[in-house]
Amino acid sequence: MCGIIGYTGKKKAMPLLMQGLKMLEYRGYDSSGIALAGQNEFKVYKKMGKLENLEAIVPRNAAALSGIGHTRWATHGGVTDANAHPHAGYRGKAVVVHNGIIDNYLELKQELQGKGANFLSETDTEVIAQLVEHYLVDQKMTPENAVLTTLGRLEGTYGLGVMFADHPGLIIGAKNGSPMVLGLGDKEVFLASDASSFAGLTRQVVYLQDKEIAILKPESWETRNLRNEAVFRNAEELTWNHEEAKKGDYDHFFLKEIFEQPQSVARAFGQGGRLVPEYGTAKLGGLNLDKREFFDIERVVFIGMGTALNAAQVGARMMESWARLPARAEDASEIRTGNPIVERNTLYFAVSQSGETADTIASIHEIQEKGGRVLGIVNTVGSSLARMCNGGVYIHAGPEISVASSKAFTNQLVVMGLIALFMGRMRVLSLTQGQAIVKEFGELPEKLQAALGCRSQIMALAKKYRNAKSMLFLGRGIMAPLAMEGALKLKEISYIHAEGYAAGNLKHGPLALISPEVPSVFIVANSQNLDRVVGNMAEVKARKGPVICVSNIDTPKLRNLADDLIIVPETCEELAPVVAALPLQLFAYYLAMELDRDIDRPRNLAKSVTTE
Ligand code: M6R
């Protein structure tokens, strides 16, 4: 969603801020802006629409050595130039960029208007700027105290960057529920919501924690808590490489990330380092539970949103199959708004690519508050979720830039599979069974590479079905959540309406939608469900619905029914969704290409959804 970049140092700030904003574009935004520091003033430039609109109005050779920038994804107030960030106090003394939502902004706004403040926008953020300015000017506070006093009045979430007309070079950052990270260079400091915004400029980072502020000057930085006490934090080294966040020869990040999956999946099992063939199990440092504690677990719950929730559904089935432990997946937003029953011997896993999804974070708070133990299955190292959890396993997908998730999904499946194998070996799986599963994991990269070979077949399919207004995705057992994921991918980037169902549900409603204009995509694995799915395909064909089938088994039963059959390599049933995911991702991609969509930045969506 919104993104923040700030810079103070010895270089010209403007190009660095623009570059940072470009790196943040993937998060989703509808306006952007920059404030540049001058002598006893700052200049604000902001524009709705794409970054090119902002680039057209910022002075190319601005001499400022510090500044703050923002990409906004509208929440409070429409998409207008006035509502774009930065927002300044009406006397031009403080200027603010903000991610998050201030719940009590209306009360604060009325109070400030009563004191004469003139508001120019409809945003909640503007009250922060006006309040800081009030303490600075009317109460003659230092910038640090003005910010700290303001934070004490705010209810809600924030990642903040504040600059001051009379203190060029000074930026104050703050965090509560929205990520903020400092990037440390040589006599220069960056402040950002996402380390990718200063990628290639420094690898030394400091992650700010909730209810902390950071005071940035060109030659120094420090962190304090809200009581203004110093908090000592060590710099950490960024784990991923700048090149990974570039498109290379691909037209879109989404396509690049699809094609990276043979390598990224290998990273998920540590290029073999997380597999123990000798004992037929997985080795996962970071779970922070000893074997006796694992024995006490009676239930497993995987929690996530969107693609991570679909992955969680697959993970729950893997856990039940391999570990014979009752397992389920839960929508984080529903946990958050309900009153979850947290049981003593239940182990919770938070599944998230970004580690910053507000609903997932809120649900984890709620479970931890009730005494539950939560482990993370997270991609972004150092993210809020990774830090909140009582341990966990990084999925090592590398930076995922496209809004639509691909490699994070398959890596989430692999990591949940490793956990299920590990727990399965402690409970019910024999050594021989474990060794056979380890072998299947090891063969995945090669099979994924082979599955990508369906690209030209899928390109032709996309041309054939480009006029479809709606599609159904259907699968049984472990393929049912993959059907949901196939539908989510398609609607997300092509804007074609799509629904995913467990195929058994077809006759209970969705069958009414079937017509020659509504294709159905069946996802089939070689399993005991095969004949039942074939029966569902026949039901669709009998009603003249076009049938596309993605299968890891090539049999006449499918050939006779499917209009289009895509064969992927066979693997054990539990890992079949990892391989079958690739043609579905490619199908969404090439249909979106046919329809000329903004594939990496689909309308209305954000890469990481940081508000509930
Ligand atoms: O960062 P997270 O994995 O927590 O994000 C969860 C969802 O917002 C995300 O998977 C979303 O559904 C994707 N855009 C789907 O492609």
Image (cartoon, rainbow, N blue to C red):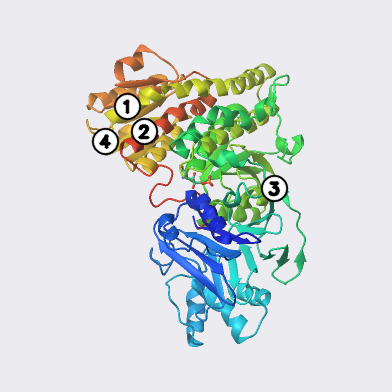
Q: Which is more foreground, mark 3 or mark 2? A: 2
Task: State which tag comes first along the sequence, 3 or 1.
Answer: 3
Question: Is residue 572 toward the left or the right of residue 225 in the image?
Answer: left
Camera-side residue of 292 and 32: 32
Q: Is residue 231 above or below residue 592?
A: below
- Position in image of residue 282 (x %, y %): 68, 28
Q: What is the spatial separation of the Cα atoms under label 4 and label 1, in whole angstroms?
A: 12 Å
Task: State which tag comes first along the sequence, 4 or 2.
Answer: 4
Camera-side residue of 114 and 294: 114
Q: Residue at 47% across / 84% down in the picture? A: 113
Find residue 563 and report its image quarter: top left
Residue type at tag 2:
Tyr
Q: Residue at 67% across / 25% down in the picture? A: 272
Disc 1 is placed on an element classified as helix
Q: What is the spatial separation of the Cα atoms under label 3 and label 1, in whole angstroms?
A: 46 Å
Residue type at tag 3:
Asn
Q: What is the spatial separation of the Cα atoms under label 4 and label 3, in whole angstroms?
A: 46 Å
Work out whether residue 158 can be spotted: no
Which residue is disc 3 drawn over? 390
Residue type at tag 4:
Ala
Which residue is disc 4 drawn over? 468
- Position in image of residue 510 (x %, y %): 30, 37
Query: Which labelled disc corresponds to residue 590?
Result: 2
Q: Dot 2, crowdedness within 10 Å: few (<14), some or many (≥20)?
A: many
Query: Which labelled disc corresponds to residue 461?
Result: 1
Work out whether residue 405 can be spotted: yes
Contact check, label 2 and label 1, Cβ < 8 Å: yes
